[in-house]
Amino acid sequence: MLDWIGDTLTAVLSGGATGLLGSAIQSFSNYKTKQLEFEQENIRLAHDAQMVQLEAQASISISQQESAAQTEKSAFELQTSSYSHDVRSYMPDVGAPSWIIAALGIVDVLRGLIRPSLTAYMAVAAAVILASANSLLGDLDQIAAAERLQTATNIWATMLYVATTIFFWWFGQRPPKRS
């Protein structure tokens, strides 16, 4: 009978210990599972936050590009409307005396000749300045030939710089034709 009590007590104690050990292992396993789920959730949230940040940056970049395009379009339209205003004729169609029509026609012609006239004037002025500078340098005997050549080179370079700047700026300000 004592054997039976010993066996029963041993069975209960070893079963309890095994149950407690199994429970502890299960609890540890549940803890680790929750910890991994928590880490996975943190990784997912960090990824989501990064995606939101990337989307926000992309949205800002798109907005900046659209704003720049709109600004450029507005500037182009403003410049084009300015040029189209310059083209407008001041001559009335009907109802004005002929001397007014003639005077306004002269204004239109003069306004149309400004750009080509200024271009031709600048070309002639640059040629006259270069010719005058070259003749002045040729008349100076007290300047050494090397100094004369250096001065002539500087004058030519300066005049070419001024002339090309004026011509390219003048003709570069015309808006491109849009169809």
Image (spheres, rainbow, N blue to C red):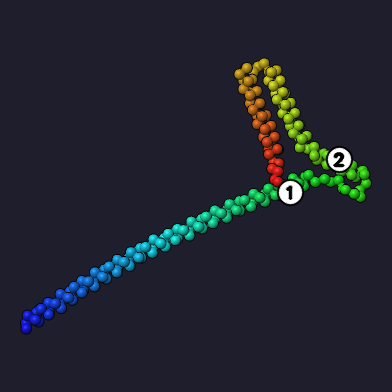
User: In the image shown, does 20 or 152 lie closer to the viewer?
Assistant: 20
Q: Is residue 93 left or right of residue 35?
A: right
Residue located 54% across and 56% down the image? 59
Q: Label 2 near label 1: C-beta < 8 Å? A: no
Q: Which mark is residue 43?
A: none
Q: Place residue 112 in its image quadrant.
A: top right
Which residue position is annotated with label 2? 106
Q: Is residue 44 above or below residue 109?
A: below
Residue 116 % position (x, y): 77, 35
User: In the image shown, does 40 or 120 lie closer to the viewer?
Assistant: 40
For badge 1, the amino acid type reads: Ser
Residue 178 % position (x, y): 70, 45
User: In the image shown, does 166 or 42 lie closer to the viewer?
Assistant: 42
Instruction: Find the distance from the CA under tag 1 to the CA under tag 2.
Output: 23 Å
Q: For the residue labelled by badge 2, is the local secondary structure a helix, a strand or a loop? A: helix
If you read the primary sequence from the N terminus, does the residue marked by circle 1 or circle 2 appear first?
1
Q: Is residue 14 above or below residue 123?
A: below
Q: Place residue 132 in its image quadrant.
A: top right
